[in-house]
Image: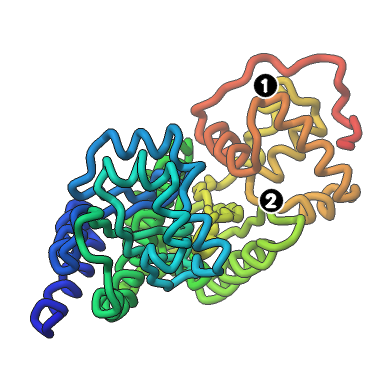
Amino acid sequence: MDSSLLSHAIDLAYSTVDDVVSWDEFVRQLQRLLRADSALLFTPKGIDDATAMDVRIDMDEWSLKAYRDHYKDHDLWYRGSKARNLDRPGTVVVGEELVDEPEFRRSEWFNDFLKPSRQCRLLGVNLEEGWSGSGPAFLNFYRSAECASFNEEDRANILLLLPHIQRAFRMKTDRLLERRRRTLMEGTLAACGTACIAIDRRMHLLLCNGMASDVLAERDGLHLGRDGRVLCDWPGDGERMAAMVATLLSTARTAQAHETSQVLLRRRSGGGALFVQGGLLKRMEGEDCVIATLVVLKPGSRRTSVPILRGLGLSAAEARLAAIVGSGCSPVAAAEELRISEGNVRTALKKIFCKLGINRQSELATLVTRVGEGEIRGGRAPHGDGADAHTG
């Protein structure tokens, strides 16, 4: 293969990263260079659809269906590669070195399948390199029985291209997976009923929904820096938020990976604090990140919320606890203020969430804020649940 053809083939390999159609053109180009009758680039059935490959060049449907339905169990080339330890990543093999020739010529595999499908000569490439995502991929070229076998020059040409093919395939796989992760995260954030952002350990903004975009645009408590990092208005707040993110990400490999954490940020406008509750989002591939909900708390919401929260079905003690936690206090701080144990606080919060039909502290903060703003008005406070009832 001369240098110009090699250079063109390498350029084609990298053009496939962002253009799936280019894989067909690339495999066809290699087929011509090797003077092959047909070619197949594939990942085995069962591999994730997001990264699976199935590029067929000059192969009839009968061959594919017959192989899947019957001849897969009679594949002497596959058996030979396993038996001779030639199925390793990065190997390039020819069919003659995988199976004994007399046995091959007598076999059902050769006479009933390979000859009719014109796939009697094989040059096979194992592309697997341990990249994230799909698993092994194979690139096979075939010639009919009337053609000469693939030779060492053919093998050498493919070996020259192999590192580029592997790298291009890995880049394509990684980009497809990242696109899928981003789509899933976008759906998660869009479904949230509150302002929600996704940030990495360096505080870079990965995604945000429309409500969170509005909060950041106000530049009051949090804003987006020129380098794409989420920044706090006050240095001390920035340190506390960064510590919250670091703490959550440190739980990624422990049983506490489901834990949440929260921080209150001051706002330049002098209004209520910005309540930020973060939770760990474990990603199957790539770096873990933190999903954080943002709730702007209104001044005095705790004081005005208690009677309305009682009207929503909470006891006096539960309403007081809900108002404290909903105004941005952590369960630990609420326990200190009420002089009860943290365990009692967490037990009571579960009952409160159940009664109010919510699931997390950020939802409680939103509810308390809406109560404080007069958006929610409860009915008459229930009787018989004395104001001195114990929270726990």
Q: In the rendered view, would you say 23 is above or below 58? A: below
| Picture residue at 15% right of the left edge, 64% below the top | 35
The colour mode here is rainbow
In the image, what residue type sits under mark 1? Leu
| Residue 179, horizontal then vertical, whole percent | 35, 53
In the image, what residue type sits under mark 2? His
| Residue 94, horizontal then vertical, whole percent | 36, 67
For marks 1 and 2, the one nearer the N-term is: 2
**Residue corresponding to mark 2:** 258
> Circle 1 — which element?
loop
Q: In the rendered view, would you say 250 is above or below 40? A: below
| Picture residue at 40% right of the left edge, 44% below the top | 49
Residue 243 at least partly seen: yes
Mark 1 burial class by Cα count in 10 Å: few <14, some 14-19, many 20+: some
| Residue 267, horizontal then vertical, whole percent | 47, 61
Q: Residue furthest left?
A: 4
Disc 1 to disc 2, how far (Cα)?
A: 29 Å
| Picture residue at 27% right of the left edge, 66% below the top | 149
**Residue corresponding to mark 1:** 312
Number of numbered discs visible in the structure rendering: 2
